[in-house]
Each structure stands twice: as C-alpha cells, then as structure tokens.
Amino acid sequence: MADETTVVLETAEGVARLTLNRPDKLNSFTRRMHADLREALAVIEGDPAIRAVVLSGAGRGFCAGQDLADLSFEPGSMTDLGALIEDNFNPLIRRLQALPKPVIAKVRGIAAGAGANLALACDLVVAGRSASFLQAFVNIGLVPDSGGTWLLPRAVGSARALGLAMLGEKLPAETAERWGMIWKCVDDAALDAEVDVLAAKLAKMPTRAIGAIKQAVRHAATADLDAQLDLERDLQSSLGASHDYSEGVNAFLQKRSPRFEGR
C-alpha cells in the first residue's frame, strides 16, 4: 500500500483487524480505498494463521458509502456508476461473502449507502448504541447497491426493506438489532471490548466448519430443500475428514476443551 494508506491491516493472535482509514471523510469509498482493501483481503485470504476478521472504520463513523468527490459530474464525462460498481463494489461484497473465515463488522457512528451494505455483507454485525444504518441512495436518486436489495429483504423482510430503501431514513442500531438486521447492539463504551472477545473466540474455533456454515446458510437463500440436503451431506463428508473434527470428538470423549487449529 502506498503513501497515504486508506486501509490499515493489523494482525495478532489469529485476528486480522481491517480499518477503513479516511476518518475526515467518514471513511467513504474512493477507487484508491478499494485498491487498498483488495490488497489487504488478499493478505487475509492467503494467511492460514488468520482465523477471524474485524472490519471497522477509523474515527467517528463506520463508512459513509461512496465519496462523491471521487466521481466526475462533468457533462460528457460523468462517471459510469454501473462500471464503478462492477469493478469495485460487487467484487468486494462477493469476496466478503465467500471468505472462508468469520468477518465481524464493528459499527461506530454512521453506516450509510454502500457502507451500510458493506456491514450487512459481513457475517456478524456488532454496533454501538449510537450507531445508525442509512440506505441513502434514494436521497440522490439511486437504488441501493452493494447487495442492499438482496441483503435487506432477507434480513428484515420486504416490507421493512422497502421502507428503508424508499424513505432513506436512518435506522438506529437498537432498532436494527430488534429487527434482526444485526447481531448485537451494545453500549458505545463496551463496543471495542465486546468485539475483541467475540473475535478472540472465533479465532479459536474450527475455521473450516465456520467457512462451511457461511457457505451453507448463503446457499440456502436460493436453493430448494433437495439441493440444500445434498450440500449439507457434501460439506459434512469433507469436514468429517478434518483435523478439527477429530480434535473436537477426542476432546468431547476426554472431557476437555478442544484445541482447534482451523484445519
């Protein structure tokens, strides 16, 4: 990553902490930040010692979506939003969903537009009580992207998804938790500690099994029962030959805590 790093990656004890680092712009996306994020995710994907990921934003916000200052509005040379999405946002969402490691979004402050849907694309979202989620797209004449029209209805149902998308109003973190849109809402002062404990726990769990759980749950959104049963069979067959399965069974029989290695 070059001089002014827009994404900070830190790793320790099996946990990668990935921080969007444009706090003066509420961590809004630029093409440069997408490039830095791709580079950081490549490191995470390629390092078997990393077994859990925490994604957060520097400063007072999580992510305010696309930075409009990074776009062109000049007649005849306006930025093609479809190309921007195809080249940057869509690959990012697909990559997070497919990553065979658990990803926690730690949300402080605003998560707006693509930033809100970036959080929803993670596996677990833990938010501070003062955080909020905003499908801001309609306020500038656009449709939710970055998976918003797919993720939202599955999380909160079509009625609430339509309300959030059509009205473009902030949703407080407490309501998001009550609606089942996020995993947990905690006091702002407890957010860091809550996520640290969760990440440390996930980093010691059977990583291959967690990756398979992600795959199975997301496959179920578009699969029929027969296809899902077949996938469960195949995943179980593969996991049944893993080190962590053997360790889990032996630990159970020996009445001790398992020591999973993520393989």
Image (spheres, helix red, strand yellow):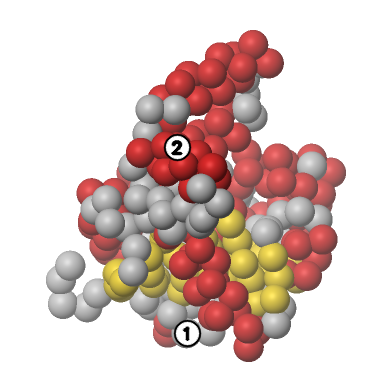
In this image, 35 relative to 198: left or right?
Answer: left
Horizontal side, residue 39 vs residue 235: left or right? left
Q: Nearer the viewer, mark 1 or mark 2?
A: 2
Q: Residue at 47% of width from left, 84% of height from top? A: 59
Up/down of 129 relative to 207, above or below: below
Residue positioned most to the top: 226
Q: Say which quadrant the C terminus sits in.
A: top left
The circle drawn on residue 245 is 2
Q: Is residue 101 visible?
A: no
Image quadrant where one finds the N terminus: bottom left
Residue 197, x across and y down, in percent: 53, 72
Q: Is residue 249 positioned above or below 165 on the image?
A: above
Write the residue at 43% across / 30% down.
Answer: 239
Residue that carries the numbered disc 1 in the rendered image: 59
Name the residue at 45% across, 47% down.
206
State the mark number for residue 209: none
Q: Is residue 215 visible?
A: yes
Which of these two is toward me, 198 or 87?
A: 198
Q: Residue at x 54, y 80 (%)?
A: 192
Answer above or below: position of 140 versus 226.
below
Q: Amino acid at mark 1?
A: Gly
